[in-house]
């Protein structure tokens, strides 16, 4: 591992909070990479040299200028709730902890402006004071930062109505600081947002975010039981296509996972029930129940009729969904891991059912319904009973062979976890905004190895990891 | 025409407002049926015997009980903004004017409750005081009653987000009074709403409505110009599929109609421009303009940068769309009429372009994009240069032969204007709620002539019209 002039850095950062306590540095050098046994093996040793915690944009600029001068890598992090090692400093150096930039600057009709480190739940709380709410958030709503969501997420709760973060209109404006001798502060809107959205902070540090707000309905968690996974998926799909029903989230999980893993909801669930978990506006519950009756669904749970004690005891329904599904499974069975896949419209229900049938209990069906290019379809976050990395790769291949592209959550690079091709817009912006390649090194293959062959069947192994003795 | 015991009726309605002045009765016996030359010919003579204007539900009940006892037909009306003669009393009798039931009973988070005669704009104004708005309304927002919209409409402004009125969740609850010796007051929810929604008041009198509210964004009218109709349609379709862009309406109108007919907007328009008229949340305008630039659209108009004088002078953008498009055309060219068609997903853009090319200037393309069963597609309200009823029927047939089903606005019956088949749910409810068949006679073929053959190629001619000498 290269050593950096940390003393020189500190002398330039007078007045900015830093931390070198090894236990704390290690803690802030991690995210939820341990969801993946592959990433756990590859990244477990990764640690930064120093945490720098700027309190405002001016301190971010000073930090980047100093790091640029000294050639020290900078890996930004929000609250570290990502799953792909995206906030882990593969080449050491500075962990740029943005949690201190947490001011919610404005809540206006239809939009908010917040510093990147603001926790989504805190923004939402302020918006709710105006009968508005954050339109889209990860299942880690309570702890995730809004900047980290944009830099490392792709959608989540709310995507059944509003699509993904990549979709026009879901981010209004980003303020980004470049990694240069004299860092610039850029305001990105419209198509320019794609330069830094979901780029893991490899080509600029997001310091401020403007996003739309939606109406703050009183959401009701409904859980329906079905006797087959396909019927559950079919009902979720048709509920998703009900344009008149205001909804925020729509999930399908195969039996017996809900009963096995959702301990606090266990009394309401049965081992043989495949479930649909829906988050529906209170005024649309009647309409939803009418549809459910027609589909012979069994109503297992509705949050609006709970006793007060139960309301307090139970987590919100969305904390059973998206990556929280896997999290709850992992707490019970550490051998569980997961995939991320897409079942493309219009064959999503049949394809999901086919894959579910193909793998049986080895791959536990988990669908998250979303709007995607204007249509309702579903992503899969199936839970995998892990045996070996080879078998995991084979399961990925079988998904892709059967027509379900995989966004591999067992890879730490943007490309391997994404579209397996160079993102020219993000690469061009990195050349402009991070000419020395110091921002979050090792995460953008297009920068590190422009000739990399995504069809080689190998994993990209970043040089810092290879030097540390990590095997591909 | 049958004569009724109007004196006996009046003696039973003491205290309830009635009106027999022939000019006023004639005025209240009409709707916008004159959009159609066929309906104008068939229905021009139609007139009721008396207007009864109840002030509350109790007076509705008394009116229906008296009419039932005396065998007098009752045709309900809101503000008479329907286009299909649905509020016209084909057999004379009582015109039941519900405009007096206009109390907005409650505006709560996510919903309102109003009497059926409340004007949508008045409900909306109250909702806006709570940063909410009516989710869906006809282009006659300023004058239409909410009950009339549900009884006679199918969707409109808002349908690009929320689908149609028939979709689950778009109506929460209806209160309906039956036509019996002792009229009952029923509360309908869930699937039961289909009994009376879009039934023209043939099987019950809607007295109270509960509907969802959406967020009251600051909507901006945008008008884009394109060099071909197909490119305009393609852009509208892709804008419709942008899930992240909050939008309320999305219309395409072929050149030269916008320039010819939209006089107050004429300065912004060009004779050779096919236009897209979009109603977009202010915070999503930037994202929309970025999409438009990519589609090489010309921005002709945006309402958010107008001088105050222009803002006052110009009608809202939605008053250029839906049936207002035809209305503005009719004011300039009385020979214009229109059709109502659907271009089914997923071939909507190609099919609309094909029909546009097929007819040339005889049928002027007009598309209204909507969500329909969870997908974005478009209805057509093409403007037709009317020559003969035979040619109009031929144009309908060509549309259907080419794959675009027509909901014929030149027919006054539910079935011919709709799915051309019996609606068993509505018929069964009529048998229960209007056993004497006194509600809005002649509008439900399934009741009047159960053996009617929709494939006969003929028009259904109600006996009261035949008796009055109307030709099929």
Image (cartoon, coloured by chain):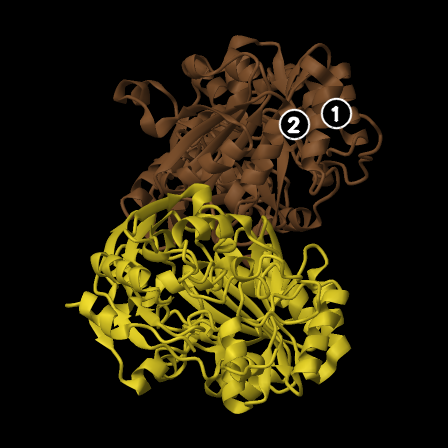
Chain colours: A brown, B yellow
- Per the image, the residue denoted by label 2 is A230
Q: Residues within 10 Å of mark 1 (few under 14, many from 20)?
A: some
Camera-side residue: A93 or A295?
A: A295
Classify residue B282 as left or right of residue B333: left
The answer to whether A264 is drawn above or below residue A118 in the figure is: above
The chain that hosts pointer 1 is: A
Q: Nearer the viewer, mark 1 or mark 2?
A: 2
Figure quadrant of residue A3: top right
Which residue is at a point 59% across and 81% down the rendered structure image?
B471
Secondary structure type for disc 2 = helix
Is residue B338 in view?
Answer: yes
**Number of numbered markers:** 2
Figure quadrant of residue A89: top right
Is residue A61 in view?
Answer: no
Classify residue A469 as left or right of residue A438: right
Q: Earlier in the sequence, mark 1 or mark 2?
A: 2
Classify residue B241 as left or right of residue B83: right
Which residue is at a point 37% across and 67% down the rendered structure image?
B73
Secondary structure type for disc 1 = helix
Which residue is at a point 41% across and 14% down the rendered structure image?
A264
- Per the image, the residue denoted by label 1 is A396
């Amino acid at each position: 591992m290269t050593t950096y002039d940390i003393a020189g850095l500190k002398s330039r950062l007078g007045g900015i909070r830093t931390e070198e306590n090894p236990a704390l540095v290690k803690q802030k050098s991690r995210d939820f990479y341990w969801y993946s046994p592959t990433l756990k093996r590859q990244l477990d040793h990764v640690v930064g040299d120093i945490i720098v915690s700027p309190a405002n944009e001016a301190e971010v600029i000073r930090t980047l200028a100093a790091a640029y001068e000294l050639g020290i890598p900078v890996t930004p992090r929000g609250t570290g709730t990502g799953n792909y090692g995206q906030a882990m400093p593969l080449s050491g150096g500075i962990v740029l902890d943005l949690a201190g930039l947490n001011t919610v600057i404005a809540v206006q009709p239809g939009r908010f402006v917040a510093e990147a480190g603001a926790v989504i739940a805190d923004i939402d709380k302020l918006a709710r004071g105006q009968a508005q709410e954050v339109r889209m958030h990860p299942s880690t709503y309570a702890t995730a930062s809004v900047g980290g969501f944009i830099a490392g997420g792709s959608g989540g709760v709310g995507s059944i109505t509003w699509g993904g973060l990549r979709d026009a209109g879901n981010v209004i404006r980003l303020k980004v600081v470049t990694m240069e001798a004299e860092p610039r502060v850029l305001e990105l809107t419209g198509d320019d947002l794609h330069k830094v959205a979901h780029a893991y902070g490899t080509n600029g540090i997001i310091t401020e975010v403007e996003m739309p707000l939606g109406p703050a309905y009183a959401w009701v968690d409904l859980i329906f039981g079905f006797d087959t996974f396909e019927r559950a998926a079919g009902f979720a799909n048709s509920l998703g296509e009900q344009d008149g029903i205001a909804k925020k989230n729509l999930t399908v999980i195969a039996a017996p996972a809900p009963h096995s893993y959702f301990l606090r909801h266990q009394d309401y669930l049965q081992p043989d029930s495949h479930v649909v978990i829906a988050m529906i506006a209170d005024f649309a519950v009647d309409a939803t129940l009418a549809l459910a009756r027609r589909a012979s669904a069994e109503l297992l749970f509705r949050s609006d009729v709970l006793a007060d004690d139960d309301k307090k005891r139970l987590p919100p329904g969305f904390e059973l969904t998206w990556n929280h599904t896997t999290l709850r499974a992992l707490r019970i069975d550490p051998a569980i891991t997961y995939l991320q896949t897409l079942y493309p419209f219009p064959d999503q229900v049949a394809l999901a059912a086919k894959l579910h049938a193909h793998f049986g209990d080895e791959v536990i069906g988990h669908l998250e319904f979303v709007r995607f290019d204007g249509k309702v379809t579903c992503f899969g976050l199936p839970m995998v009973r892990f045996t070996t990395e080879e078998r995991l790769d084979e399961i990925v291949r079988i998904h892709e062979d059967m027509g379900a592209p995989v966004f591999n959550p067992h890879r730490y690079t943007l490309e391997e976890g994404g579209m397996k091709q160079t993102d020219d817009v993000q690469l061009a912006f990195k050349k402009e905004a991070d000419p020395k390649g110091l921002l979050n090194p090792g995460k953008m293959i297009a920068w590190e190895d422009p000739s990399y062959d995504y069809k080689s069947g190998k994993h990209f192994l970043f040089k810092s990891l290879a030097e540390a003795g990590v095997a591909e």
